[in-house]
Amino acid sequence: MPVCPAALGLPAERVEAVLRAAGAAPSLHNSQPWSFRLWRHLIEVHADVGRRLPAADPEDRELRLGCGAALLNLRLALDHHRVHPVVTVPPDGDDRTTLLAEVRAGQRGSPSAESERLYGMIERRHTARAPFRERPVPAELRHEMIQAVQREGCWLHVVGRGELGHLEGLVHRAHRVQMADGRFREELARWTGRDVGDPEGVPAAAAGPAPEPQDQWVLRDFSAGRAPRREPGLAFEAQPLLAVVSSQDSGPRAEVRAGEALQRMLLTATAGGLVASLMSQVIEVAETRQELATLLGGGWNPHAVVRIGFGAPGPPAPRRPVGDVVEAGTSASSP
Ligand SMILES: Cc1cc2nc3c(=O)[nH]c(=O)nc-3n(C[C@H](O)[C@H](O)[C@H](O)COP(=O)(O)O)c2cc1C
């Protein structure tokens, strides 16, 4: 029994494969805050507001980034199945709707080599929270990531050596603010340190090593205190490559776009043999986010801080079954 109806000229099994690829996108705490409403000629991408993370993400910025990342995967997967997607994003301003994007079928035809290369990375990309090797990221790969982000209408600011100290201070400050908030600690504990077999949240096995006081960059403990003690001498890289996905516009549309840019960048990094993790504290605390915007030179809205390098890929985090994220459109809910 198929879990989805046919859509955009694709049979049910292909639609299911497309939605599975969309759902492999990264999301804050692996909350997977998306749902897809399927019509014969339309796929709607919705925010699943039942999966909000109000303590870490009170304005749903990162929720929309995750949905944008899922939208990019959806586009690549449709392309793979020879349907060129045409995406419309509704204008900002209607707070009552959860609709973030509408995807229709354009021309049918073969995908580009670049689209296929990135499609092939969707299942291979996993957040890597362990220390990276002390090997610099070559200039060509940095350039490819910058181009990937620009292709989605955003900007990737590679943090310069002279800016690292300032950013480090912001990360520590944001971390302290969040950890002093009982609601934040409770939410983090609820979504992390999950057992194998849980279809959502961050599994303890993907949490990376437990933070230690000597660490230069505070990374969150995603294991809910379950990470084993670190092997002696296992230290984080001294000069991480940090980059900030930003956009000129702000608001929900810009956040969906930034999610698409983030995901195109992460898939490009994976194709280049790199691994990555995110450090979102600075983005989540309004005051440090504003300081980061100033550090970027003003005029840019920062959306995601990404740490990139060479290292072992993280283990896969689980996903909800496709049947849980899909809804068939009915005439009663016609668009
Ligand atoms: C907007 C956003 C913010 C995130 N922030 C963090 C973070 O601060 N620290 C972290 O280790 N992972 C962060 N992640 C990664 C998620 O925890 C990860 O995507 C999720 O657990 C699914 O795992 P996967 O990326 O391996 O598929 C973030 C992801 C997104 C999309």
Image (tube, rainbow, N blue to C red):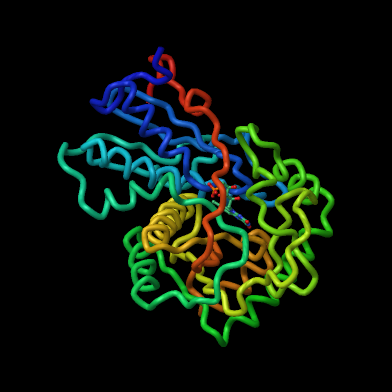
Residue 71 position, x and y percent, is 40, 43
Which quarter of the rendered picture does the C terminus lie within?
A: top left
Residue 227 position, x and y percent, is 75, 52
In the picture provided, is 283 more to the left or to the right than 193? left
What residue lies at 51% left-to-right and 82% top-to-bottom? 160
Q: Nearer the viewer, residue 52 or 322?
A: 322
What residue lies at 56% left-to-right and 48% top-to-bottom? 315
In the picture provided, is 126 more to the left or to the right than 38? right
What residue lies at 23% left-to-right and 41% top-to-bottom? 84
Q: Is residue 321 above or below residue 45?
A: above
Which quarter of the rendered picture does the N terminus lie within?
A: top left
In the picture provided, is 193 more to the left or to the right than 182? left
Farthest residue toward the front?
232
Residue 179 position, x and y percent, is 80, 59
Farthest residue toward the top?
1
Residue 13 position, x and y percent, is 34, 23
Q: How many marks?
A: 0
